[in-house]
Image (tube, rainbow, N blue to C red):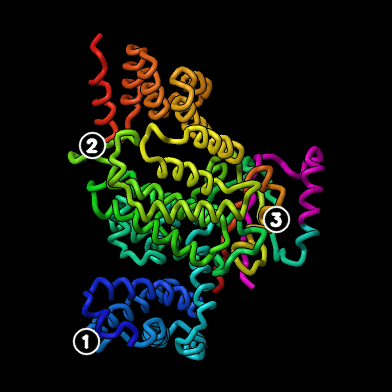
């Protein structure tokens, strides 16, 4: 079965904070409803905790790190699911049930099968 | 022999049209069988070239579609075998499908699948338009590029990217389920209508390839109507395109200047197209008397104009009523503007002006100012009229349209 990554872009906040209890309940609800097709995923701390890593001058070069996310955007990548779906129509239907879809946006990307 | 040597003698045009028509159907089937648009396209192109080479010499086969399908399938199998990274299973799958005698319902379904895949909402609209012209219309990449005024390399990239997304993200090759159909159909219709408007905006005589997009859109709409004869959206779309296209030759004068509806020579309108369009409106309305589709209503308005013997004899009451219906399904400022213009014809310029000024949202739309200018002119408010023409021109419009406004402005009494 093909897999899709559903990347959630939302407000750049700490979703583990109890003030987001209701939102988390919504995510739990989705997690339970879609349990049979969720193959993985994670929620991420806000971009303030992000470190962007680059190696300059090609493989084996110097490691250069910068504080912050790769791309500075209003809505940030705050989590992802790995979903199983037969085709894009099905993947879109699933993504539309993720709370981020109405609280931000969900980017659906097909996963390469090696 | 179907039409036998006769078809060939009639000239290569008939043959080319037949090959093109059948080529689209064969492509649709081959996409399903191979699951690969690129491969299917290459194979069909190869078969089409062979047909154009051999048919004029040997005659048109009894079943041209089967001939094309068998030839294209063989070609596809050759390609699959040559590409080592493909599994042998795929070649076998192509081979074991019935060699070319697909029942016609299956072929119809394949075409529908192709329609809905090319016009899938997960593809950008510009990609949908390009794919529809390339695969359903059978135009070459170069022709699509010229039609849409995009460099050929850009168009090739756009098409490749769209086909890649279909394959990699797995956009399904499927006719949508009944509950999704109305929404998806609206998307398909919007794509075809956009193609039509691209050609219509180019104007007659301006650029033949761009102008031919209107013919191409009518052809696509006809195909949709043939595939989905019970869908009002599709009937309305075809009716609207036929009725608008019927005025094509009368839209400009001998010097290529744009003419208003009231200035057009109605004897130059295409009678048979109007007849067909009007009949389609009737058929579509009978299917949805309670809540007609927006395309059907727009076609009904076009029909009111098409059936009026002269501009003065237009049934403005009917036109205004249809705009009222349209507003109830699709309320937007442009529809309100057009309704105001019809009300002005029925009740006088001041009545129309009051409605136009109440719209508000269209300050940046040149046609709001241009329509206002025409009504101010009718009301004898010359200075305001001149200012409105100037506002319209300042906002920019196509060359023939701007020329037209300047001409109208020059006719105003001097201050």
Determine the secondary structure under disc 3. strand
Residue B19 vertical placement versus B194 (above, below) = below
Q: Position of residue B49 (x, y in %)?
A: 28, 78
Which of B109 and B295 lies nearest the eye of the viewer?
B295
Q: Residue at x 67, y 59 (%)?
A: B179
Contact between marks 2 and 3 (CB within 8 A): the answer is no
The Cα–Cα distance between marks 2 and 3, rounded to whole angstroms, is 63 Å
Crowding at dot 1, Cα within 10 Å, few <14 / some 14-19 / many 20+, comes out as few
Crowding at dot 2, Cα within 10 Å, few <14 / some 14-19 / many 20+, comes out as some
- Residue A42: mark in rendering: 3
Please give left or right for residue B79 compared with residue A26 in the image.
left
Of the residues under marks 1 and 2, which one precedes in the sequence?
1
Q: Residue B232 occupies which quadrant of the picture?
A: bottom right
The Cα–Cα distance between marks 1 and 2, rounded to whole angstroms, is 46 Å
Q: Chain of mark 2?
A: B
Please give left or right for residue B47 compared with residue B31 in the image.
left
Same subunit, tags 3 and 1: no
The answer to if B50 sits in the magenta stretch is: no
Q: In this picture, which residue range is highlighted in magenta?
A: A1-30
- Residue B257: mark in rendering: 2
Q: Position of residue B310 (x, y in %)?
A: 36, 37
Same subunit, tags 2 and 3: no
Residue B398 vertical placement versus B408 (above, below) = below
Q: Which residue is mark 1?
A: B57
Q: Position of residue A74 (x, y in %)?
A: 58, 38
Determine the secondary structure under disc 1. helix
- Residue B313: mark in rendering: none
Q: Position of residue B397 (x, y in %)?
A: 32, 33
Label 2 vs label 3, nearer the camera: 2
Q: Chain of mark 1?
A: B
């Amino acid at each position: 079965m093909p897999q899709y990554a559903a990347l959630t872009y939302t407000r750049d906040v700490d979703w583990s904070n109890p003030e987001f209890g209701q939102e988390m309940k919504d995510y739990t609800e989705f997690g339970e409803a879609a349990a049979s097709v969720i193959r993985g995923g994670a929620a991420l701390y806000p971009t303030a905790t992000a470190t962007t890593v680059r190696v300059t001058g090609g493989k084996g070069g110097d490691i250069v790190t910068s504080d912050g996310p790769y791309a500075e955007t209003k809505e940030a990548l705050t989590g992802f699911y790995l979903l199983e779906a037969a085709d894009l129509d099905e993947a879109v239907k699933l993504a539309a049930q993720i709370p981020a879809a109405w609280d931000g946006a969900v980017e659906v990307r097909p996963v390469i099968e090696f | 022999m179907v039409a036998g040597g006769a078809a060939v003698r009639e000239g290569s045009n008939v043959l080319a049209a037949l090959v093109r028509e059948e080529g689209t159907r064969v492509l649709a089937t081959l996409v399903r069988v191979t699951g690969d648009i690129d491969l299917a396209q290459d194979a069909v192109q190869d078969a089409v070239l062979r047909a154009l080479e051999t048919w004029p010499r040997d005659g048109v086969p009894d079943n041209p579609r089967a001939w094309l399908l068998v030839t294209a399938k063989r070609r596809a199998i050759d390609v699959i075998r040559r590409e080592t990274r493909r599994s042998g299973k795929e070649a076998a799958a192509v081979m074991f499908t019935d060699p070319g005698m697909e029942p016609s319902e299956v072929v119809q379904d394949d075409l529908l699948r192709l329609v809905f895949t090319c016009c899938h909402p997960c593809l950008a609209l510009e990609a949908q338009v390009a794919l529809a012209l390339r695969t359903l219309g059978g135009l070459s990449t170069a022709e699509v590029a010229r039609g849409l005024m995009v460099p050929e390399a850009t168009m090739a990239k756009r098409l490749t990217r769209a086909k890649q997304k279909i394959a990699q993200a797995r956009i399904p090759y499927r006719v949508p389920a009944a509950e999704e159909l109305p929404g998806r159909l609206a998307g398909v219709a919007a794509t075809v209508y956009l193609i039509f408007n691209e050609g219509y905006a180019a104007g007659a005589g301006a650029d033949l390839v761009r102008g031919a997009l209107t013919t191409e859109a009518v052809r696509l709409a006809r195909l949709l109507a043939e595939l989905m004869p019970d869908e009002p959206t599709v009937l309305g779309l075809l009716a609207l395109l036929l009725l608008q296209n019927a005025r094509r030759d009368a839209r400009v004068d001998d010097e290529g200047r744009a003419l208003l509806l009231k200035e057009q020579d109605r004897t130059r309108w295409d009678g048979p197209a109007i007849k067909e369009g009007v009949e389609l409106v009737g058929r579509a309305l009978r299917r949805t008397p309670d809540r007609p589709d927006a395309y059907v209503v727009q076609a009904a308005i076009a029909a009111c104009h098409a059936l009026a013997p002269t501009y003065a004899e237009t049934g403005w009451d009917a036109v205004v009523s249809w705009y009222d219906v349209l507003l109830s399904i699709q309320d937007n400022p442009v529809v309100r503007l057009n309704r105001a213009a019809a009300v002005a014809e029925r009740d006088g310029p001041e009545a129309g002006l009051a409605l136009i000024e109440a719209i508000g949202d269209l300050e940046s739309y040149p046609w709001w100012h241009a329509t206002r200018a025409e009504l101010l002119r009718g009301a004898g408010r010359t200075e305001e009229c001149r200012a409105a023409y100037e506002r319209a021109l300042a906002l920019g419009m196509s060359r023939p349209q701007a020329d037209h406004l300047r001409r109208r402005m020059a006719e105003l009494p001097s201050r």
